[in-house]
Image (cartoon, grey):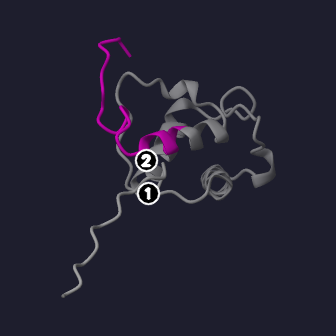
Amino acid sequence: MPVQPSAPVAESAPAARLPERGVLIERLRETFARALGYPPEVFTDDAHLEADLGITSVKKTELLVDLLDEYDLPTPPATMHIRDYNTLPKLASLMELLASPGSDAEHGADDGAPV
């Protein structure tokens, strides 16, 4: 009896396209440090990107878009407020959410709320 090829295994782990969380946060730290000319150690887990480090929301969004492209992640829906993701761990959480299979963010769900 011929052996049937097994069916592809569905991705069950969230953020399957992303590295492990610690590695992802380190990647964010390196990206922000290199782009802004800051030493990586100023990007602590609790450092507020705008209030503590003076990073404009425009620059933060620009760097986030580059990272989303790098990991082939969808653009967050308009109902998500990027300003709420103000530390590197929060940005990592956003990226993990966008990478989660079947997440509302991946499909651009819109609850009708203004941006």
Residue 44: x, y in percent? 78, 43
Tag 1 residue: 71
What residue sits 63% from the left and 35% below the top? 55
Give how far across and how far down residue 75 sits, in percent. 36, 40
Q: Which mark is residue 99?
A: 2
Residues at marks 1 and 2, CA–CA distance in whole angstroms? 9 Å
Mark 1: amino acid: Tyr
Q: In the drawing, does residue 80 fall left or right of residue 114?
A: right
Q: Residue furthest front?
A: 1
Residue 38 numbered tag: none
Instruction: Identify the mark nearer the N-term, 1 or 2.
Output: 1
Say which quarter of the image contains residue 23.
bottom right
Q: Which x, y percent locates residue 80?
A: 43, 25
Magenta: main secondary structure equals loop
Q: Which residues are magenta?
A: 94-115
Q: Quadrant of the N terminus?
A: bottom left
User: Of discs 1 and 2, which sits in the foreground?
Assistant: 2
Looking at the image, residue 54 lies above or below residue 64: above
In the image, taking residue 2 as reference, residue 100 lies left or right, namely right
Q: Amino acid at mark 2?
A: Ala
Asked if the residues shown at circle 1 and circle 2 are in contact, with their CB atoms under 8 angstroms apart, the answer is yes
Tell me the residue at 67%/52% (across/down): 29
10 Å neighbourhood of mark 1: few (<14), some, or many (≥20)?
some
Indicate the secondary structure of the residue bearing disc 1: loop
